[in-house]
Amino acid sequence: MTTEATVYLVEDDEAVRDSLQMVLESVGHKVASYSRADSFLEEYSPEMAGCMVLDIRMPGMNGMELQRQLNTRNSILPIIFVTGHGDVPMAVDAMQRGAVDFVQKPYREEELLGKIQQAIAADAENRADLEEKHKIRGKLTELTPRESQVMELMIEGKANKVIAYDLDISQRTVEIHRARVMEKMGVRSLAHLVRMVMAAQDTSN
């Protein structure tokens, strides 16, 4: 289970941080704010959902370094960088490392709020996809080795008699295994089974 969608605000300037937190909360966002990048990192958990609004230039660990640390932990939390005019090349580099967007100071609140809303929506969709993959992979582990063999051949489109020949078992045994595969995977059609297995094998998440 993931936590409630939250905007994780990492900004060393207290006035900017407090002002932005107030704006975010005024439109209904849950906010957790941090004055230092390492403070956020100490509390980081993969269960954190929502998005980050992260200043690039901060004392101690800067925003780019925090992003690198999160990448080593395989974080999927979307990052929106806040940058000064001279930091745009850094922001572009940050996006190449996986950040979803950046805004330049001084920024319009409406622009930032729009980017935050998009990031939270994308995070929710991404986490739903991940949860579905985990469920499918869990079902796959419940298959016996023989059921897995039969399933792989089913997905290749082979008929029962061909599967029986390939595995040197009776066609009736194939039918039994096939029925068990469909039951354990919770599907009624071969097409649905194929889509599920392809989703589970997708390594993009």
Image (cartoon, rainbow, N blue to C red):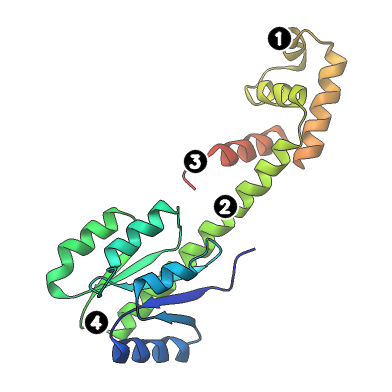
Categorize mark 3 by other alpha carbons within 10 Å: few (<14), some (14-19), many (20+).
Answer: few
- Which disc is residue 191 wearing? none
Q: Is residue 68 left or right of residue 42?
A: left
x then y, percent, for residue 156: 62, 22
Q: Which residue bears the numbered disc 3?
A: 203
Q: Which of marks 2 and 1 precedes in the sequence?
A: 2
Give the SS element for disc 3: loop
Disc 1, SS: helix
Amino acid of disc 4: Tyr
Sequence-earlier tag: 3 or 1: 1
Choose between 34 and 134: the one closer to the eye. 34
- The residue tagged 2 is 130
Q: CA distance from mark 1 to mark 4?
A: 65 Å
83 is higher (above) or lower (below) than 25: above
Q: Name the amino acid, label 2.
A: Leu
Q: How many marks?
A: 4
Q: What residue is disc 1 on?
A: 166
| Residue that numbered label 4 is attached to | 107
- Counting residues from the start of the chain, the first of labels 4 and 3 encountered is 4
What crowding class fits label 2: few (fewer than 14 Cα within 10 Å), some (14-19), or many (20 or more)? some
The answer to the question of whether label 3 and label 1 lie on touching residues, with beta carbons closer than 8 A, is no
**Residue 163 in view in this figure:** yes
The image quarter containing residue 93 is: bottom left
Residue at position x 30%, y 81% in the image: 12
The CA distance from mark 4 to mark 3 is 36 Å
Q: What is the distance, in whole Å, between disc 2 and disc 3 at their CAs?
A: 10 Å
- Picture residue at 51% right of the left edge, 57% below the top: 126
Q: Depth-wise, is mark 1 or mark 2 nearer the camera?
A: 2
Q: Let me know if residue 187 appears in the view.
A: no
